[in-house]
Image: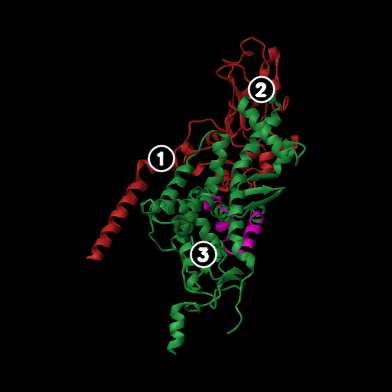
Chain colours: A green, B red
Amino acid sequence: MSSKITPFFLWRHLNKLRWAVLILVFSMLVLLPFLHLYQSYAAAHAYDLLEPGQKQLYDAMEWLTSPFIDDPKQDLDAIKGTTWSGTFWGLQVSDPLALAGQVSATLSVYWPFMLAGLIPILLTVFFGRFFCGWICPATFLYELNSILSLWLQRLGIKSGRRRFDRRLKYLVLLVGLILSAISGAVLVSIIYPPAIIGREIYFAITMGGFGAGLTFFVITLLFDLLISRRGFCRYLCPGGALYSLLGRYRLVRIKRIVENCNDCAKCNAVCEFALNPLRDNFGQECNNCTACISVCPTDALSFVIRPHDDPDQGPGHLSKQYKQRQSGK
Amino acid sequence: MSDRRYFLKELIAGALASTVLKSPLAEAAFTAQTSLRYLRPPGALAEKEFLSHCIRCGQCGEICPNRCISFFNLENGVDALNTPYIIPREQACILCMKCGQVCPTGAIKPLERTAEDILGNVKMGKAQVNKNLCLSWQGKTCGVCYRACPLADVAIRVGLLERPFVLDGCVGCGLCERSCIQIPQAIKITPQHNIENMS
């Protein structure tokens, strides 16, 4: 028997890194509105006129940022925006769905904006639907929602496990773009959770209240909780659909090492997108979230650089089924 | 049996969808128009083009040092949801032009903070003086609007007893309306999209 192939030991810790990134992105979305308030107070030169709460905010933000910047009015303009569209030191980065939405709404192409989508598109071609697993602030809340559903299950409240056709979201994307074209407004942005969350956090902090988008987002949370686990991302999200299409021939993939696999199916149970790692079926939907790698007890999942999945490799070589088949021969 | 049930389900779903889509609520959602007198940020495209270019990222509001940019909820229709607007009486635009520089979509044109760029490209609206309310026109010398104007003598000039006259250079930033000491204000900005609708 050949020596055991073990994947690089850090891969199984990537899931922790992913959670760290999700928390970082989400906390940045919360921090940026506060920094904006601080900037506006600083620009008004009105520290003495602030209310006590505002003064506390001013002091906290000054303490937080003063090691890095000289002039809050100018220097804090470096990072603005959300994951839907943001500016980092003058570099504008936008969600590919925003590009598609604008093109369909205007029926023309505004090139500077298309350049803003270049980096995310290139990364998606390389890493697949990684945005959905690693950055999306809605994913953070949806995964917490999944954990909540597990807790509820422990208390005896059954959460929804219905499954629909995964291709439904491509239809949502298509209909969204067509409606954008008809109405002449970027309507996809109002049903796209990461865009909604970025805006709603900003509204809640600086405008003193959530907007209409929150209602939609809460409905998607309830849909995930009561009807279909992680259902919005799996079956309805237009952005996820676009990322899936772009990442169809992604180079970085997860693959199963059939020699190490014992068919325990933990990977399938943990997969948020209801894919089938156990039978090598990742497809264009996999977002490289690495949850399956971290849960695998026998180190049977690893990364590979290849533009297509393996065909089904059959039962894992450590499984009963495989051993019986071998001895039967 | 199952076929018939499926058919019935489809029928009910279809009926529900059509009633929802054709309901007055849905109609109102798309044709709603706010009675607010709002301005778009400085350098914004014409209203229709603006709606199709804006991706509702909110960066214009996030960079505005004067916090004058707010965002629509559903009161102005679904197509204007989360688009930026300015109510000049509450907080007027100081023409810093940062929103245009941060806007990734071209919905707000990227402009420099120079008189040339501002006078040539910013069309938020036009100020109008109500002579019955204006203190100066009623004989009590005031002139606050003139002093608040960032484009004094280009956008507004004052005559005898500080009576204001709005000139062609007015870009509609709203600082005069914001500063007017009369209640209700004697000088108001007519938004550009309203001017276009009238003509």
Residue count near mark 3 (Cα–Cα under 10 Å), binned few <14, some 14–19, many ≥20:
many
Between circles 1 and 2, the one closer to the viewer is 2
Q: Whole-Å distance between the Cαs marked 3 and 2? A: 53 Å
- Identified by mark 3, the residue type is Glu
The residue sitting at the top extreme is B139
Helix, strand, or loop for circle 2? helix
- Identified by mark 1, the residue type is Ala
Residue A56 placement (x, y as % from top left) = 64, 30
Q: Earlier in the sequence, mark 3 or mark 2?
A: 2
Helix, strand, or loop for circle 3? helix
Residue under pointer 2 = A49
* Image-quadrant location for residue B99: top right
- The stretch drawn in magenta includes residue A125: yes
In this picture, is A129 found above or below B93? below
The residue sitting at the left extreme is B1
Q: Is residue B181 left or right of residue A327?
A: right
Helix, strand, or loop for circle 1? helix
Residue B126 placement (x, y as % from top left) = 62, 29
Viewer-proximal residue among A90 and A78: A78
The mark found on residue B28 in the picture is: 1
Q: Whole-Å distance between the Cαs marked 3 and 1? A: 37 Å
Q: Does the magenta stretch mainly form a helix, a strand or a loop?
A: helix
Q: Which residues are magenta?
A: A115-139
- Identified by mark 2, the residue type is Leu
Question: What is the chain identity of the residue bearing mark 3?
Answer: A
In this picture, is A234 found above or below B110? below
Question: What is the chain identity of the residue bearing mark 1?
Answer: B
Residue count near mark 1 (Cα–Cα under 10 Å), binned few <14, some 14–19, many ≥20:
some
Question: What is the chain identity of the residue bearing mark 2?
Answer: A
Marks 1, 2 in one chain: no
The answer to whether mark 1 and mark 2 are in CB contact below 8 A is no
